[in-house]
Image (cartoon, grey):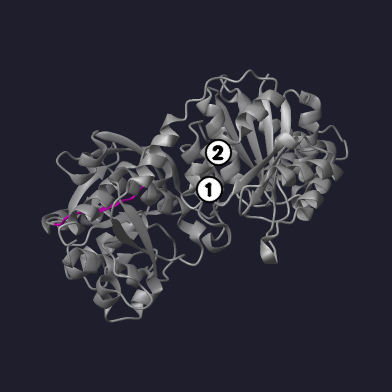
Amino acid sequence: MNKYIFITGGVCSSLGKGVAASSLGALLEGRGFNVRMVKCDPYINVDAGTMSPYQHGEVYVTDDGAETDLDLGNYARFTSGHLSRVNSITTGQVYDSVIRKEREGRYLGRCVQVIPHITDEIKARILAAAREDADTDVVIIEIGGTVGDIESIPFLEAARQLIHESGKINALSVHLTLIPEVSGGELKTKPTQHSVKAMQEQGIQPDVLICRAPVMLDETTRRKIALFTNMESGAVFTSYNVDTTIYEIPLVFFDQKLDQVVLKKLGVESRHANLKPWYSMMESFQSRKGKVRIGIVGKYMDLHDSYKSVYEALFHAGLACAVEVDLVKIDSSRLEETDHIDAVLKRGTAEVSGVDGILVPGGFGQRGINGMVKAAAWARTNKIPYFGICLGMQIMVIDWSRNVLGWEDADSTEFNQDTKHPVISLLETQVNVKDYGGTMRLGGSESVLEPETRVFSAYGDKVISERHRHRYEFSNKYRGEMTESGLRLTAFTPDGSLVECVEWPDHPWGLGVQFHPEFKSKPTAAAPLFRDFIAAVRDKKQPAD
């Protein structure tokens, strides 16, 4: 029988349930257990694909093309368990499935209700995720939202039922709460007491409590919390503010013996812990020397989570290259409004620091596009390392068309349907698509790399697999003219029908890819293109330093 761990949160949102769940998964993997991670999202959207990055953050894409919550990105960075669409469960999926079954008459005329039909569907999806890999030992299920939210109630009830049906030895509840600090530095435990009470009202007595606090809780405080929440004092842990990186959290929990307590409560004999990769990663963090400034020229700069995987991949690359990566966030719309881009990007202003490299990430819609083209042209002409991802590659092509080939109106048909030079155009498979959810080119697919290119040097293999999320591509109509003018086309789909990578000639490092390499980057294994991009920035900057 699989073991189940339900991760819930209380008091307020954004406490770090995803990081806590991922860290626990990392610890259990370090002890030799096979772990599967599942995210239950209370929103009625079927998936995260149609939600604004400003509201929900980035959309994380799995190999099988699922558009999921960004917490699956945390799972991927902290753990090695396979992630697919079954690892992401939403209220929208659940209700859609139940309603379809009702329309098909599969409930035999019964009145369809939240209990048992909705909760049964939730349980079935959790069990399906557990069964997808026969070698799974532990399933960690994170329930989104905060206890007390009406949207989360069906998921909490499903968790209560699974804990009851599996038995306490096979399923347990881990609850994450907040210990706020008030004036004078006093820590207040009352919000945590109320949060656990709310869980008890749902029929769930937490087995383990993780308290999000500014500092490590002392023994007296832990005992007080345990007394008022009906818990063992040894089952109260602290997730305190670290001044290093979130990737230290597994080691913070390990020092407190969180994994040992969890395994004991699940009746599992503890194994030797191998956390060498995490300690090595922290050694790399401490040994970084120097700093490089990377200008992120994007559309969704007001919310950090909008480009979460990109920022994390840059951090990973910094670890691999032994340098600190300083992120300089630049709203591309601002660049459209200035005629002095060199002052903004190179020398810096009161608002924006000067940058050593430029990265243009993915995005949709016309706003800020010309600002991105300006940034690409500046990086190309000033020999500044440039990395374009998805839209960022398309921006490279538009810049080249306008400023090298002289096609002033060159554009993507996403932004200008009437352009005489549609160098980026809609995929043929997208022409008649009317529904927007889950209909793009999504998920993992292979690319064939040209030899003696930067992309080949990064991966070291002729054939690679990366994940995609887009509707528009390099227009094959212009392949000949682009190549003749010097732009290098350096990766293609296996049948040669689509361009997957372009590179600038005679440039320190100017490269764009249609796929999203950030989704596979880990703190212990940086994505190859991010690693080589940061290495190029570092090597170009060092002589000046």
- The residue indicated by pointer 1 is 438
Q: Measuring from the top left, give residue 231's x and y in whole percent.
A: 79, 37
For residue 509, which quarter of the picture? Answer: bottom left
Secondary structure type for disc 2: helix
Nearest to the eye among marks 2 and 1: give it: 2
Amino acid type at circle 2 is: Ser
Residue stretch in magenta: 507-517
On screen, residue 11 above or below 303: above
Q: Measuring from the top left, give residue 278's x and y in whole percent.
A: 44, 36
Q: Residue at x 83, y 36 (%)?
A: 116
Q: Residue at x 29, y 69 (%)?
A: 354
Q: Residue at x 38, y 61 (%)?
A: 327
Q: Residue at x 20, y 63 (%)?
A: 380
Residue 511 lies within the magenta run: yes
Q: Which is more N-terminal, label 1 or label 2?
A: 2
On screen, residue 281 above or below 171: below
Secondary structure type for disc 1: loop
- The residue indicated by pointer 2 is 23
Residue 329 lies within the magenta run: no
Task: State the quadrant of the C terminus.
Answer: bottom left
Q: Is residue 101 left or right of residue 51?
A: right
Q: Measuring from the top left, give residue 100's x and y in whole percent.
A: 72, 40
Amino acid type at circle 1 is: Gly
Task: State the quadrant of the N terminus.
Answer: top right
| Few, some or many residues within 10 Å of mark 1 (<14, 14–19, 20+) | some
| Mark pair 2, 1: CA separation | 30 Å
